[in-house]
Amino acid sequence: MLIFDSVQKTKRKFIPLEEGKVSLYVCGPTVYDDAHLGHAKSALVFDLLTRVLTANGYDVTYARNITDIDDKIIKKAQEANKDIKEITDFYTEAFHKEMQAIGVSLPTIEPKATESLEAMIELITKLIDNKHAYPTDEGDVYFDTSSDSEYLKLSHRVQDEDDKLQRVESSSAKKNPADFALWKSVKDDTITFESPFGKGRPGWHLECSAMVEKHLAKPENKFAVDIHGGGADLLFPHHENEAAQTRCGTNHALANYWMHNGFVNIDGEKMSKSLGNSFFLKDALKEYDGEVLRFYLLSTHYRSNFNFNTEDLALSKKRLDKIYRLKKRLFGLAQNSDKTAFQDELLTALSDDMNVSLALALIDEMISTANEALDSAGKHKQLKKETISNLAYIEKVLGFGVKNPYEYFQFGIEEDTKAKIDMLIEKRDEAKKAKDFEASDKLRDEILAFGVNIMDTPQGTFWEKV
RNA sequence: GGUGCCAUCGCCAAGUGGUAAGGCCGCAGCCUGCAAAGCUGCUAUCCCCAGUUCAAAUCUGGGUGGCACCUCCA
């Protein structure tokens, strides 16, 4: 297994801290709004990573946090005149539902910030004791970046002198302009937590460090986790700060490997509130099958920036359709569990820093070969068994082709429309039997008007949504 | 302004020193009552310039053009 380490900027052979085991931590969502395609991309990338690691025989412990303490959440709650928990529960549930729709499995552990306060306070206390953090008169606690010689090495950043001066003017309580808050005091009566440093709430960066320690880290290891992942924008300042906290507050570094996924852009531009072009997953799921979205978002390399557009999405659907059509050809047949050469090749491709493009090329080739054989005369007993086994493997490792193939092709068609289509197909079959092609062609036009395609096969006539 | 990434067929996209995967679209054919689906065949020398090398899309230098991060962000 090779992993591109975005800190060392090179592909590295993956060697776990503990034989046969992998600990993976990924920064999850802040639950104050609906998940957009970027959240989906990140979740999909690390879902795939988990599957590939598992297929390689590793026992993976995957933690993805839920940030349920945050200024934006508080603001949203105040605006809606609702309880904080009501907001966070609502969006957490929505997140889970949408992730399930795109085939993202639940992580092994899903820690919440509100449930990890003890660990956070413990870490801050250690950092203060170690002289890596300091409280201010206002009741805040800051991390002292000048106390950490490794600071900024993760993101390969250099201090900007002009920027430094500007920030000194704006924030006098900080020792250094780059210092960041570990604990923010809260004076009003919005959500606050008790701590030895006074009432307040934890800083965002601290959360992840504390949760990693609590749920994944082992004191004797050189690193807290094997792999730490997240979106490319998190490298600085979030991951830089996390790494500093862990490095200075514990006796190990945060992660051995760092992985960052690229962005999802819409029509060449980054999704953002200010541009008003955020594409929410819930809206996409109304129009497209979740698995099509999964296939599309995973179809290019995870580190590349992804330019979302409906034309390309349609191409992805066509490619996924091919998997399902083959599945349909073999529907209902028993599976053989023997591992095939195809499966080895597929796993090898995915084990090379998740080369999905190569994996998809292998899949297309496998599909063509299988279809070609099935088109030719003969029973093809062995081939059928192997093909079914291959499809099952694709399902397991990539999460493509998990649905019933007939239902897949009927996405978004109402039940009564389905009944009408079936009725028309029956009438057309009768006309065809009677060799009344004029009538059967007319019936076909009627069927096509529902936005579906029909295809005649030896097993009968089937229809698919276009 | 600082830091970094990217540029491969009409479109999407692998390949990072050894002579251009795959998909979509298109064209031709097989199959089909006709279609659809499926199958077969055909379709690029890798943004520009210079250099290193027996050999470069792949390395180096210089352009040009995109993009990201530096503030909350997946």
Image (tube, coloured by chain):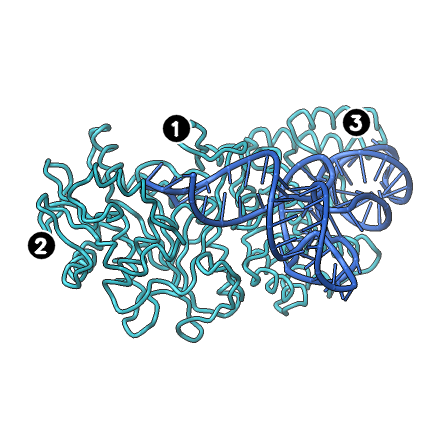
Q: What is the drawing colour of chain B?
A: blue
Residue ID at (26%, 52%): A207
Chain letter for the residue marked with disc 1 in the picture? A
- Spatial CA distance of label 3 from label 2 is 80 Å
Q: Are marks 1 and 3 on the same chain?
A: yes
The percent position of residue A167, horizontal first and vertical second, equals 25, 40
Q: Residue at x 23, y 63 (%)?
A: A249
**Quadrant in which residue A369 is drawn:** bottom right
Given residues B71 and A29, the one toward you in this image is: B71
Residue A404 — which label? none
Instruction: Confirm whether circles 3 and 2 share one chain.
Output: yes
Determine whether, in the image, residue A382 is placed left or right of residue A250.
Answer: right
Q: Is residue A234 above or below residue A190?
A: below
Say which chain tag 2 marks: A
Q: Which residue is mark 2?
A: A196
Is A348 drawn above or below residue A19 in the view shown?
Answer: above
**Marks 1,3: beta carbons within 8 A:** no
Q: Amino acid at mark 2?
A: Pro
Q: Residues within 10 Å of mark 2 (few under 14, many from 20)?
A: few
- Amino acid type assigned to the residue bearing label 3 in the image: Asp
Would you call the spot at circle 1 few (<14 residues within 10 Å), some (14-19), or many (20 or more)?
few
In the rendered image of the structure, the colour used to display chain A is cyan
Q: Nearer the viewer, residue A52 or A321?
A: A52
The spot of residue A202 in percent (x, y) is: 20, 48
- Quarter assignment of residue B9: top right
- Residue A441 has which mark? 3
For mark 2, give the secondary structure.
loop
| Residue A458 in view (yes/no) | no
- Which quadrant would the C terminus of chain A be assigned to in this image? top right
Label number found at residue A274 = 1
Q: Element under label 3? A: helix
